[in-house]
Image: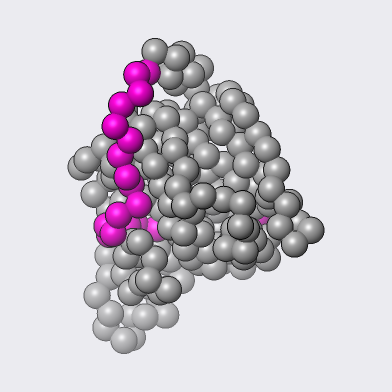
Amino acid sequence: MSVHEVLEMSTKKNPPVMKLIISFVALLSLASLAVSSVKQSAQTMPSACQVIDRVLIESHNVTVSGKTIQFSKVACSADALIASRSLEKRQVLNSCLPVPATLGCVTEAGLTGPATADCEELASLLIASGELGEFFEVSPGFAEILTFQTCEWAWINKSNSILEYCFSGLESLGEDLSETCTIEVGAIGGFAMPSDSGATPADTWILEVVLA
């Protein structure tokens, strides 16, 4: 999969992260305005939680305005599942703090992404739902996955600590990815992660938006 990264945009709706929106198309459209940008060369961007390796832990549905969101908790590998059984309950690290984040669109020849309308609807339903708490917890090597129709959001913990993230941040990042990485620009999905990912355990995560 190739990844195109390009320009920084200001936050909107006061989300918990500042966003670096990544789009080759955006780079071309803003070049004449002399906007400072950074473009990285194409690179391989496989999922941090491959579908073939996932182990489903639990799944449930939440219905909002007659429409259903599926929530799934998965281990991203059998090794992560085994490790979780011996994981002591330690301090949970809050990952929903204001940090710069990098967003990117992923493309692959011959494949299409989720319907933009489905991802937009997922964001709207998440806002409207009164059944969700403020945060969700994810164990090391696990993912919290939200699915609506063709759209899947996967928040993946790549650290060795238990992390918690906020649904408001998930909605904001997911919506921006859905608007930027659309089928119309040839994207099959997108990803978001802290710009200094790995600097601290709390910043070692990634959100992926892909075809369900």
Q: Residue furthest bottom?
A: 33
Regarding residue 146, the answer to whether it shows in the image is yes
Q: Position of residue 118 (x, y in %)?
A: 68, 60
Q: Is residue 103 left or right of residue 51?
A: left
Q: Which residues are magenta?
A: 87-116
Q: Residue furthest right?
A: 66
Residue 17 in the image: above or below residue 57: below
| Quadrant housing residue 89 | top left
Q: Is residue 33 left or right of residue 189?
A: left
Magenta stretch holds residue 101: yes
Q: Quadrant of the C terminus?
A: top right
The secondary structure that dominates the magenta segment is loop
Q: Position of residue 204 (x, y in %)?
A: 31, 40
Q: Residue at x 36, y 38 (%)?
A: 163
Q: Residue at x 33, y 35 (%)?
A: 92
Magenta stretch holds residue 34: no
